[in-house]
Amino acid sequence: MTTKVRTLISVGLLAAAVACGGGRPTGDTEGPLRVVATTSIVGDLVRSIGGDVIELETLMGAGVDPHLYKPSAGDVRAMASAQVVVYSGLHLEGKMTEVLAEMGTRGVETVEVAACVPADSLLTVAGYDNLHDPHVWFDVSLWQYAAACLRDALIRIDPENAEGFQERGDEMITEFASLDAWVRERVATLPEDRRVLVTAHDAFSYFGRAYGLEVRGLLGVSTAAEAGTADVQALAAFIADRGLPAVFVESSVPPRYIEALTEAVIARGGEVTIGGSLYSDALGSPGGPAETYVGTVRANVDTIVGALSRSEP
Protein backbone atom coordinates (compact mmCIF):
# COMPACT_ATOMS: atom_id res chain seq x y z
CA MET A 1 0.00 0.00 0.00
CA THR A 2 1.41 3.37 -0.99
CA THR A 3 1.80 6.34 1.33
CA LYS A 4 -0.80 8.22 -0.71
CA VAL A 5 -3.36 5.43 -0.30
CA ARG A 6 -2.66 5.16 3.45
CA THR A 7 -3.16 8.90 3.81
CA LEU A 8 -6.46 8.79 1.91
CA ILE A 9 -7.69 5.96 4.12
CA SER A 10 -6.69 7.82 7.29
CA VAL A 11 -8.40 11.01 6.19
CA GLY A 12 -11.44 9.01 5.11
CA LEU A 13 -11.70 7.41 8.54
CA LEU A 14 -11.45 10.81 10.16
CA ALA A 15 -14.12 12.33 7.93
CA ALA A 16 -16.46 9.45 8.70
CA ALA A 17 -15.83 9.82 12.43
CA VAL A 18 -16.54 13.55 12.39
CA ALA A 19 -19.68 12.98 10.33
CA CYS A 20 -20.93 10.58 13.01
CA GLY A 21 -20.60 13.24 15.68
CA GLY A 22 -17.54 15.08 16.89
CA GLY A 23 -18.85 16.14 20.31
CA ARG A 24 -18.69 19.61 21.83
CA PRO A 25 -16.24 22.15 20.44
CA THR A 26 -12.87 22.56 22.14
CA GLY A 27 -13.93 25.78 23.85
CA ASP A 28 -16.92 24.18 25.60
CA THR A 29 -16.28 24.28 29.36
CA GLU A 30 -19.24 22.16 30.51
CA GLY A 31 -18.23 18.92 32.22
CA PRO A 32 -14.73 17.46 32.48
CA LEU A 33 -12.17 18.15 29.78
CA ARG A 34 -12.22 15.21 27.37
CA VAL A 35 -8.67 14.05 26.67
CA VAL A 36 -7.38 11.18 24.54
CA ALA A 37 -3.80 9.95 25.04
CA THR A 38 -2.04 7.69 22.58
CA THR A 39 0.38 5.52 24.58
CA SER A 40 0.10 4.21 28.12
CA ILE A 41 3.17 6.22 29.15
CA VAL A 42 1.61 9.45 27.90
CA GLY A 43 -1.72 8.42 29.43
CA ASP A 44 -0.13 8.08 32.85
CA LEU A 45 1.31 11.59 32.56
CA VAL A 46 -2.09 12.98 31.57
CA ARG A 47 -3.84 11.19 34.42
CA SER A 48 -1.29 12.36 36.97
CA ILE A 49 -1.44 16.03 35.98
CA GLY A 50 -5.05 16.22 34.82
CA GLY A 51 -6.52 14.65 37.95
CA ASP A 52 -10.28 14.24 38.31
CA VAL A 53 -11.17 17.31 36.26
CA ILE A 54 -10.44 15.46 33.00
CA GLU A 55 -12.07 12.52 31.31
CA LEU A 56 -9.24 10.39 29.93
CA GLU A 57 -9.18 7.67 27.29
CA THR A 58 -5.87 5.98 26.44
CA LEU A 59 -5.76 4.23 23.08
CA MET A 60 -2.86 1.82 23.66
CA GLY A 61 -2.83 -0.48 26.67
CA ALA A 62 -0.11 -2.44 28.43
CA GLY A 63 2.40 -4.13 26.16
CA VAL A 64 1.22 -2.40 22.97
CA ASP A 65 3.96 -1.37 20.53
CA PRO A 66 3.30 2.22 19.36
CA HIS A 67 5.71 1.88 16.42
CA LEU A 68 3.39 -0.66 14.79
CA TYR A 69 0.03 0.51 16.15
CA LYS A 70 -2.60 1.35 13.54
CA PRO A 71 -5.56 3.46 14.70
CA SER A 72 -8.93 1.79 14.35
CA ALA A 73 -12.10 3.57 13.27
CA GLY A 74 -13.04 3.66 16.97
CA ASP A 75 -9.76 5.34 17.83
CA VAL A 76 -10.34 7.98 15.18
CA ARG A 77 -13.86 8.62 16.49
CA ALA A 78 -12.50 8.93 20.04
CA MET A 79 -9.91 11.50 18.96
CA ALA A 80 -12.39 13.44 16.84
CA SER A 81 -14.79 13.58 19.81
CA ALA A 82 -12.13 14.72 22.27
CA GLN A 83 -11.22 18.27 23.13
CA VAL A 84 -7.53 17.44 23.54
CA VAL A 85 -5.33 14.71 22.06
CA VAL A 86 -1.98 14.17 23.79
CA TYR A 87 0.74 12.16 22.09
CA SER A 88 4.42 11.50 22.60
CA GLY A 89 5.63 12.50 19.15
CA LEU A 90 8.99 12.47 17.37
CA HIS A 91 7.35 9.86 15.11
CA LEU A 92 6.90 7.33 17.93
CA GLU A 93 3.30 6.80 16.81
CA GLY A 94 4.45 6.46 13.22
CA LYS A 95 1.30 4.96 11.72
CA MET A 96 -0.88 7.64 13.34
CA THR A 97 1.00 10.61 11.88
CA GLU A 98 -1.57 11.61 9.26
CA VAL A 99 -4.53 11.27 11.61
CA LEU A 100 -2.83 13.27 14.38
CA ALA A 101 -1.96 16.03 11.92
CA GLU A 102 -5.52 16.13 10.61
CA MET A 103 -6.94 16.46 14.13
CA GLY A 104 -5.18 19.78 14.56
CA THR A 105 -6.99 21.17 11.51
CA ARG A 106 -10.43 20.21 12.82
CA GLY A 107 -10.54 22.10 16.10
CA VAL A 108 -9.08 19.42 18.35
CA GLU A 109 -6.19 20.64 20.52
CA THR A 110 -3.13 18.43 20.03
CA VAL A 111 -0.20 18.34 22.44
CA GLU A 112 3.09 16.67 21.44
CA VAL A 113 4.88 16.39 24.78
CA ALA A 114 8.25 15.16 23.46
CA ALA A 115 8.46 18.26 21.26
CA CYS A 116 9.16 20.27 24.43
CA VAL A 117 12.44 18.47 25.06
CA PRO A 118 15.29 20.85 24.10
CA ALA A 119 16.51 20.12 20.59
CA ASP A 120 20.14 19.87 21.71
CA SER A 121 19.16 17.04 24.09
CA LEU A 122 17.67 14.87 21.34
CA LEU A 123 19.54 11.95 19.82
CA THR A 124 19.48 11.56 16.06
CA VAL A 125 18.78 8.24 14.40
CA ALA A 126 21.85 6.85 12.64
CA GLY A 127 21.72 7.73 8.95
CA TYR A 128 18.89 10.26 9.37
CA ASP A 129 20.07 13.73 10.34
CA ASN A 130 16.52 15.10 10.66
CA LEU A 131 15.01 12.13 12.50
CA HIS A 132 15.26 11.90 16.28
CA ASP A 133 15.06 8.95 18.63
CA PRO A 134 11.58 9.24 20.22
CA HIS A 135 12.31 7.30 23.44
CA VAL A 136 13.04 10.41 25.52
CA TRP A 137 11.22 9.17 28.65
CA PHE A 138 14.11 6.79 29.45
CA ASP A 139 16.10 9.82 30.57
CA VAL A 140 13.91 10.82 33.50
CA SER A 141 15.35 14.33 33.53
CA LEU A 142 14.06 14.81 29.97
CA TRP A 143 10.58 13.54 30.85
CA GLN A 144 10.37 16.48 33.26
CA TYR A 145 10.13 18.69 30.17
CA ALA A 146 7.19 16.59 28.97
CA ALA A 147 5.47 17.06 32.33
CA ALA A 148 5.99 20.83 32.21
CA CYS A 149 4.78 20.88 28.60
CA LEU A 150 1.55 19.09 29.44
CA ARG A 151 0.99 21.15 32.61
CA ASP A 152 1.28 24.40 30.68
CA ALA A 153 -0.91 23.15 27.82
CA LEU A 154 -3.71 22.10 30.17
CA ILE A 155 -3.52 25.45 31.97
CA ARG A 156 -3.87 27.24 28.62
CA ILE A 157 -6.72 25.04 27.42
CA ASP A 158 -8.67 24.91 30.70
CA PRO A 159 -7.73 28.00 32.76
CA GLU A 160 -10.58 27.43 35.25
CA ASN A 161 -8.65 24.43 36.61
CA ALA A 162 -5.21 26.03 36.27
CA GLU A 163 -4.37 25.87 39.97
CA GLY A 164 -4.81 22.11 40.13
CA PHE A 165 -2.85 21.53 36.92
CA GLN A 166 -0.04 23.72 38.22
CA GLU A 167 0.11 21.92 41.57
CA ARG A 168 -0.01 18.41 40.17
CA GLY A 169 2.41 19.23 37.38
CA ASP A 170 4.92 20.69 39.82
CA GLU A 171 4.56 17.61 42.02
CA MET A 172 5.31 15.34 39.06
CA ILE A 173 8.40 17.34 38.11
CA THR A 174 9.68 17.10 41.69
CA GLU A 175 8.97 13.37 41.80
CA PHE A 176 10.81 12.86 38.52
CA ALA A 177 13.85 14.72 39.87
CA SER A 178 13.95 12.32 42.85
CA LEU A 179 13.49 9.34 40.54
CA ASP A 180 16.35 10.51 38.31
CA ALA A 181 18.67 10.68 41.33
CA TRP A 182 17.57 7.19 42.44
CA VAL A 183 18.34 5.71 39.01
CA ARG A 184 21.82 7.20 39.06
CA GLU A 185 22.50 5.73 42.50
CA ARG A 186 21.28 2.25 41.52
CA VAL A 187 23.21 2.09 38.25
CA ALA A 188 26.36 3.29 40.03
CA THR A 189 26.32 0.06 42.07
CA LEU A 190 27.13 -1.94 38.93
CA PRO A 191 30.77 -2.78 38.22
CA GLU A 192 31.91 -0.65 35.29
CA ASP A 193 32.53 -3.66 33.04
CA ARG A 194 28.91 -4.76 33.55
CA ARG A 195 27.33 -1.48 32.52
CA VAL A 196 26.30 -2.85 29.13
CA LEU A 197 22.63 -3.17 28.23
CA VAL A 198 21.54 -5.40 25.35
CA THR A 199 17.84 -5.37 24.48
CA ALA A 200 15.44 -6.32 21.73
CA HIS A 201 15.31 -2.93 20.03
CA ASP A 202 17.25 0.29 20.25
CA ALA A 203 14.98 2.05 22.75
CA PHE A 204 17.40 2.69 25.60
CA SER A 205 19.93 5.11 24.12
CA TYR A 206 18.70 8.02 26.25
CA PHE A 207 18.87 5.76 29.30
CA GLY A 208 22.43 4.77 28.48
CA ARG A 209 23.58 8.32 27.85
CA ALA A 210 21.99 9.65 31.03
CA TYR A 211 23.09 6.90 33.42
CA GLY A 212 26.38 5.69 31.99
CA LEU A 213 25.62 2.40 30.24
CA GLU A 214 26.70 1.17 26.85
CA VAL A 215 23.52 0.20 24.98
CA ARG A 216 23.02 -2.23 22.12
CA GLY A 217 19.67 -3.08 20.50
CA LEU A 218 19.11 -5.96 18.11
CA LEU A 219 16.44 -4.11 16.15
CA GLY A 220 16.62 -0.44 15.26
CA VAL A 221 14.95 2.54 16.91
CA SER A 222 11.65 1.39 15.40
CA THR A 223 10.46 -2.19 15.79
CA ALA A 224 9.21 -1.98 12.20
CA ALA A 225 12.77 -2.89 11.23
CA GLU A 226 13.89 -6.50 11.01
CA ALA A 227 17.13 -8.03 12.24
CA GLY A 228 19.04 -10.12 9.73
CA THR A 229 21.31 -13.07 10.42
CA ALA A 230 24.37 -10.85 10.18
CA ASP A 231 22.93 -8.52 12.84
CA VAL A 232 22.29 -11.43 15.20
CA GLN A 233 25.76 -12.89 14.68
CA ALA A 234 27.52 -9.55 15.15
CA LEU A 235 25.72 -8.84 18.41
CA ALA A 236 26.27 -12.41 19.60
CA ALA A 237 30.00 -12.01 19.03
CA PHE A 238 29.97 -8.78 21.01
CA ILE A 239 28.17 -10.43 23.95
CA ALA A 240 30.47 -13.45 23.97
CA ASP A 241 33.63 -11.32 23.73
CA ARG A 242 32.52 -9.06 26.58
CA GLY A 243 31.35 -11.97 28.75
CA LEU A 244 28.00 -10.34 29.47
CA PRO A 245 25.86 -12.33 31.89
CA ALA A 246 22.45 -11.25 30.63
CA VAL A 247 20.41 -9.74 27.81
CA PHE A 248 16.83 -8.53 28.03
CA VAL A 249 13.52 -9.04 26.27
CA GLU A 250 10.93 -6.28 26.12
CA SER A 251 7.26 -6.44 27.01
CA SER A 252 6.16 -4.85 23.72
CA VAL A 253 8.51 -6.81 21.40
CA PRO A 254 8.19 -10.55 20.60
CA PRO A 255 10.80 -12.55 22.60
CA ARG A 256 11.92 -14.57 19.57
CA TYR A 257 14.53 -11.96 18.65
CA ILE A 258 16.40 -12.22 21.94
CA GLU A 259 15.89 -15.97 22.10
CA ALA A 260 17.65 -16.27 18.73
CA LEU A 261 20.41 -14.00 20.02
CA THR A 262 21.06 -16.12 23.12
CA GLU A 263 21.17 -19.25 20.98
CA ALA A 264 23.78 -17.60 18.75
CA VAL A 265 25.88 -16.67 21.79
CA ILE A 266 25.75 -20.24 23.10
CA ALA A 267 26.66 -21.59 19.65
CA ARG A 268 29.82 -19.49 19.90
CA GLY A 269 30.71 -21.11 23.21
CA GLY A 270 29.52 -18.19 25.30
CA GLU A 271 27.14 -18.18 28.24
CA VAL A 272 24.31 -15.72 28.58
CA THR A 273 20.81 -15.74 30.05
CA ILE A 274 17.70 -13.67 29.54
CA GLY A 275 17.87 -11.36 32.53
CA GLY A 276 14.20 -10.46 32.50
CA SER A 277 11.63 -8.44 30.62
CA LEU A 278 11.93 -4.66 30.38
CA TYR A 279 9.11 -2.23 29.76
CA SER A 280 10.14 -0.15 26.76
CA ASP A 281 7.35 1.51 24.78
CA ALA A 282 4.47 0.71 27.13
CA LEU A 283 3.68 0.44 30.83
CA GLY A 284 2.92 -2.80 32.61
CA SER A 285 -0.51 -4.21 33.37
CA PRO A 286 -2.89 -2.39 35.76
CA GLY A 287 -2.35 -3.48 39.35
CA GLY A 288 1.25 -4.51 38.72
CA PRO A 289 4.46 -2.80 39.83
CA ALA A 290 4.89 -1.14 36.43
CA GLU A 291 1.40 0.28 36.00
CA THR A 292 2.74 3.85 36.27
CA TYR A 293 5.70 5.60 34.67
CA VAL A 294 7.53 5.85 37.99
CA GLY A 295 6.85 2.18 38.72
CA THR A 296 8.03 1.22 35.23
CA VAL A 297 11.35 3.04 35.62
CA ARG A 298 11.94 1.45 39.00
CA ALA A 299 11.02 -2.03 37.76
CA ASN A 300 13.34 -1.70 34.75
CA VAL A 301 16.29 -0.48 36.81
CA ASP A 302 15.84 -3.22 39.41
CA THR A 303 15.72 -5.85 36.65
CA ILE A 304 18.78 -4.46 34.85
CA VAL A 305 20.93 -4.02 37.93
CA GLY A 306 19.90 -7.35 39.39
CA ALA A 307 20.71 -9.34 36.25
CA LEU A 308 23.95 -7.54 35.36
CA SER A 309 25.25 -7.80 38.93
CA ARG A 310 25.42 -11.58 38.77
CA SER A 311 29.01 -12.83 38.72
CA GLU A 312 28.22 -15.68 36.36
CA PRO A 313 25.77 -15.97 33.41
Image (spheres, helix red, strand yellow):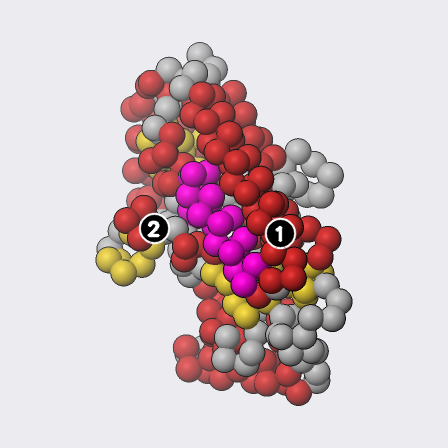
Q: Are marks 1 and 2 in contact (CB under 8 Å)?
A: no
Q: Mostly what secondary structure, the magenta segment?
A: helix
Name of the residue lying farthest toward the top? 311
In the figure, is residue 185 to the left or right of 62?
A: left
Residue sitting at 38 percent across and 40 percent down?
Answer: 206
Q: Earlier in the sequence, mark 1 or mark 2?
A: 2
Q: Which residue is mark 2?
A: 118
The circle drawn on residue 50 is: none
Instruction: Identify the magenta region.
Output: 135-156
Q: Is residue 119 visible?
A: yes
Q: Residues within 10 Å of mark 1 (few under 14, many from 20)?
A: few
Look at the picture and state if 271 lies above or below 131.
Answer: above
Q: Residue 221's x, y, as percent?
A: 38, 50
> Any magenta on residue 277?
no
Of the 4 image quadrants, the one containing the N terminus is: bottom left
Q: Determine crowd level at label 2: few under 14, some 14-19, many 20+ residues with C-alpha closer than 10 A.
A: few
